[in-house]
Amino acid sequence: MNKLKEVLTIPENRLDRKYFLLLILVAFIFSMVVRYIWVSDFSGVEQFKWNNELMINTNDGYYWAEGARDILAGHHQENDLSPILTPAAELTALLAKIIPVSFETLILWLPGILGSLLVLPIMLIARLLRQDLLGFFAAMLGAIAWSYYNRTMIGYYDTDMLIIVLPTLTVWAVMYALKRDSSIAMLLAPTFAIASMYWHAGTTNVIIGTFLITFFYMIIFERKNLYYYKFLAVFVLVLTTLPIWIKPLLIVALISLFLLAKERLTDKIVMGITIVSFIIYIIFGGFEWIVGILHNAYLTRGLVAAELDMTSLKFFGVVNTVREAGHIPFETFANRISGSVFGFWLSTFGYILLLVRYRIMLLTLPMVALGFFALQGGLRFTVFAVPFMALGGMSLIFIMAKYIGLFFNEKSKKYAQYAVIILFAGMIIYPNIKHVQLYKVPTVFMKDEVKVLAKLGEMASREDYVVSWWDYGYPIRYYADVKTLVDGGKHAGISNFPVAFELTSNQVAAANMARLDVEFTEKSFKEPCGASIECMLKAYKAKNPNDFLNALNDKNLQRPAKTRDIYFFLPNRMMNIYPTVNMFSNIDLLSGKQGARPFFFMSQNFKDENNKIILSNAVSLDKKTAEVTIGKQKVKLNYYVHTYYDKNGVYKADIQKVQTNQPGVSAIFMEAHGQFLIVDERVMNSLYFRLFVLEQYDKDLFEKVISSPYAKVYKLKI
């Protein structure tokens, strides 16, 4: 083993502190320059700007922005779900008070700045190994690695901006404490661990894994080292469920005891203190993490999820529509960790060699293992492996440079080694830069959509509700300052069903469900009775949910008293996900069986050729025979619709009846949107199509309050 370690040893290159700090700064600037590519690409696109600043590019970001906005305003509405007590919102509000930039500028740049801080722990870990230059190149790779960049790019305002930085700092702090053998050094790891768990509870498993591997590391290599027992006695207190303000007090008290009574602490006393710390852990939350892991595993199972929260009803599970929760191909997995398959294998082999050469690197295994879990658990986990795989890749490159240098004389040896390092480092860094250049992710909303929401916010009260799909919940709340029924955090099947029903059913049933959904949602805050659909069934004493849903077609249905206004926000972008929205309501609530899918086809790349309109290779419209060809099947055309804006800017929908003797489809040409639709009767009669596409609405039920090509808003009258 010693011989192998000697073979794998890289000449030490520990720099003077000022040069080391300079390299950290250079790596940080490099990370920010690469992230600026997105800003440069879109800075001239006015539709991506609001208040003279680029908007953010992640839906969830508007959740934290809403919380920060309300903290700064000093108020929010009861039960509006504003995250005013979350770390991300609190930190943003604090920085907004300190930094003299607009709020929009702050939330745009904050993820890039905080995400780029990953260069710090990567370089600090390398410095512990006395490999500063290796750390520098690893930091440049890790900070812009494919998956890490995607989740910390400028504009990706989310908790991801620190979700890897803080655990990686924790791992470094544990390594630092164990190598320094200092009571003061003990304070760093618990501090970063508590901060990490407070920032995002999802990192708890990483902290637990780091603790466990430190424990086994001690048992195997350092069981006679009293310092390790002291450190574990301190670190285990982090894992308790005690209030966050009590943990630091206990940790500081224990470290103070170790300092003040250093000469009097015998082996037995230290062992006793360690046992007491473990007992405190067991009493206050011990093994709860096992239950949490099992619970999370359960939640990721199944296709049509039977969500049985206080009910026997079955709903379509949202997990089936989230790409991040699915299995990913190996090439995608490798690319997201290292930028290329070549870079991945280089990094994997190098990481293994790092573990062999520096056994302290074993403490990084929990994060790497979690990153590799992405092959089964979904692509979101790959980011956890990024910093250490970057160190592994650069480690192998430095070993290669060491042996290639043997072929040169002393005068040219160093130049040859640097040439190898720069060449191979460039080979694995470049694919990640190329990805950044090609990753043209747009802002969440366009400027004209935000204009609609801002106008809506002027006419609606903060207690009013806006009905729309959950993807748009957070931006709606942020820009219009209203309440929503579903959003990026509240979108289980049981919550999505009523909203999907409201968007895809006929106008009468949709209007009735919207009023019931809002009033019973508010009622559930004061008199808990489950989700709104459960409250409805209980209130109407409905034994069969399907009979209850059929009753909603009655315009004279007895409804609860109106307590607030309800608006429907119907954006054109919802057209792309209409079939998905329909899946949530097109289900038998007793059996969980999906109903027959309505026909929906959309094309924005069509050609008008003589008597035919070619919509795709498999779909075409014959203008002469009024038939639609779908694959090998020919279907009669019932209606042909042409929507457009006239010279006065008034929306028009010319509807031409072709034939109604037999079931068929309708063709809709939306001129202003440059899109062609082929839909069946069920889609044609849905609320979304009637109100957004055709603007044919029941004036007893709805009032059109805002109309634009990007989005339309209707006010519910009942």
Image (tube, rainbow, N blue to C red):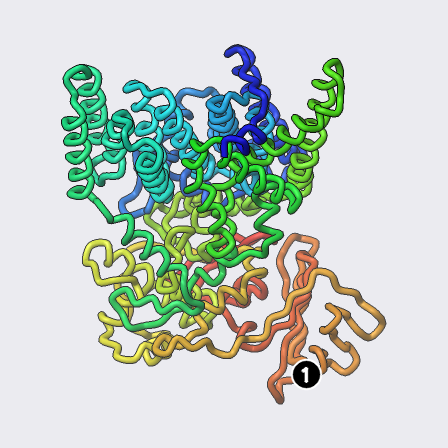
- Residue 676 x %, y %: 68, 65
Density class for disc 1 (Cα within 10 Å; few <14, some 14-19, many ≥20) is: many
The structure residue drawn at horizontal position 25% and vertical position 66%, both measured from the top left corner, is 310
Q: Nearer the viewer, residue 652 or 425?
A: 425
The structure residue drawn at horizontal position 38% and vertical position 27%, both measured from the top left corner, is 173
Q: Nearer the viewer, residue 575 or 180?
A: 180
Mark 1: secondary structure: strand
Q: Nearer the viewer, residue 713 or 280?
A: 280
Can residue 608 be seen here? The reply is yes
The structure residue drawn at horizontal position 44% and vertical position 60%, both measured from the top left corner, is 319
Q: Amino acid at mark 1?
A: Lys
Can residue 56 be seen here? The reply is no
Q: Looking at the image, which residue sits at the far right?
A: 610
Tell me the quarter of the picture where residue 275 sits. top left
- Residue 655 x %, y %: 65, 72
Question: Is 140 placed left or right of 521 in the picture?
Answer: right
Tell me the quarter of the picture where residue 480 sits. top left
Q: Looking at the image, which residue sits at the far bottom?
A: 661
- Quarter of the picture containing the C terminus is bottom left
Q: Nearer the viewer, residue 447 or 113?
A: 113
- Residue 215 x %, y %: 31, 37
In the image, residue 388 sits, relative to residue 326, either above or below, namely above
Question: Is 209 placed left or right of 687 in the picture?
Answer: left
Residue tagged 1:
636
The structure residue drawn at horizontal position 63% and vertical position 82%, both measured from the top left corner, is 664
Question: Is 388 placed left or right of 216 in the picture?
Answer: right
- Residue 171 x %, y %: 40, 32
Question: Is 671 placed left or right of 163 in the picture?
Answer: right
Count of numbered tags? 1
